[in-house]
């Protein structure tokens, strides 16, 4: 498996936790992990915090590349992929999960400056190439 360059974890209190990782080859992987039960009657001799009948189950449920992700059906391709051609896949720099009801949006940035948003199946709903920042005085001159 390729090295992980970015990772984020869902913050909901559901029975399944989502972990999203990004790699050096520009790939995004979505994993699910079952959480221990919140309340369970334990025998009196059990260690505190122990869950004798709980076993974590980790599954990879989706893999996609933002550089080649399909566009969400019904969206204008010119808005989702500005300027037409997209740069090749690049190392993932940052990830974030944005909750959306019972679903989520995956926000991704990579080393080329591409910032994109994807629904849970990997389809792209928005993309933009960020311009490099040029250090210098603020607009309007120094001291303003």
Image: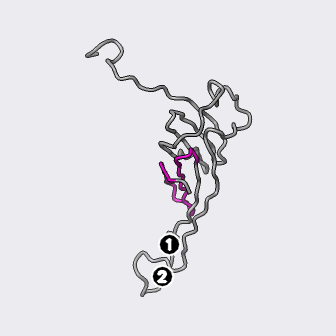
Vertical side of 38 occupied by 139: above or below: above
- Residue farthest to the left? 143
Q: Nearer the viewer, residue 121 or 37?
A: 121
Task: Say left or right for 96 vs 117.
Answer: left
Vertical side of 43 occupied by 122: above or below: above
Spot occupied by residue 13 in the image (x, y as percentages of width and height): 51, 59
- Residue farthest to the top? 140
Query: Mark 1: few, some, or many residues within 10 Å (few <14, many ≥20)?
Result: few
Vertical side of 51 occupied by 135: above or below: above
Residue ID for mark 1: 39
Which residue occupies 58% across, 44% down? 105
Which segment did they paint magenta? 3-27
Which residue occupies 25% across, 16% down? 143
Task: Say left or right for 67 vs 44.
Answer: right
Q: How is the image coloured?
A: one colour
Q: Quadrant of the C terminus?
A: top left
- Residue 74 part of the magenta-drawn span: no
Element marked by disc 1? loop
Q: Nearer the viewer, residue 54 or 12?
A: 54
**Distance in Å between CA atoms under marks 1 and 2:** 9 Å
- Residue 16 part of the magenta-drawn span: yes
Residue ID for mark 2: 42
Task: Say left or right for 95 vs 27.
Answer: left
Spot occupied by residue 79 in the image (x, y as percentages of width and height): 64, 27
């Amino acid at each position: 498996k390729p090295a992980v360059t970015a990772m984020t974890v869902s913050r909901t209190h559901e029975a399944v936790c989502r972990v999203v990782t990004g790699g050096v080859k520009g790939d995004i992987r979505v994993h699910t992990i079952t959480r221990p039960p919140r309340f369970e009657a334990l025998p009196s001799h059990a260690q505190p915090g122990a869950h004798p009948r709980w076993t974590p189950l980790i599954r990879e449920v989706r893999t996609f590349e933002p550089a080649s992700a399909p566009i969400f059906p019904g969206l204008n391709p010119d808005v989702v992929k500005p300027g037409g051609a997209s740069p090749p896949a690049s190392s993932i720099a940052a990830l974030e999960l944005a909750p959306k009801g019972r679903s989520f949006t995956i926000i991704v940035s990579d080393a080329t400056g591409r910032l994109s948003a994807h629904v849970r199946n990997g389809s792209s709903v928005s993309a933009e190439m960020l311009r490099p920042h040029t250090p210098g005085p603020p607009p309007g001159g120094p001291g303003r």
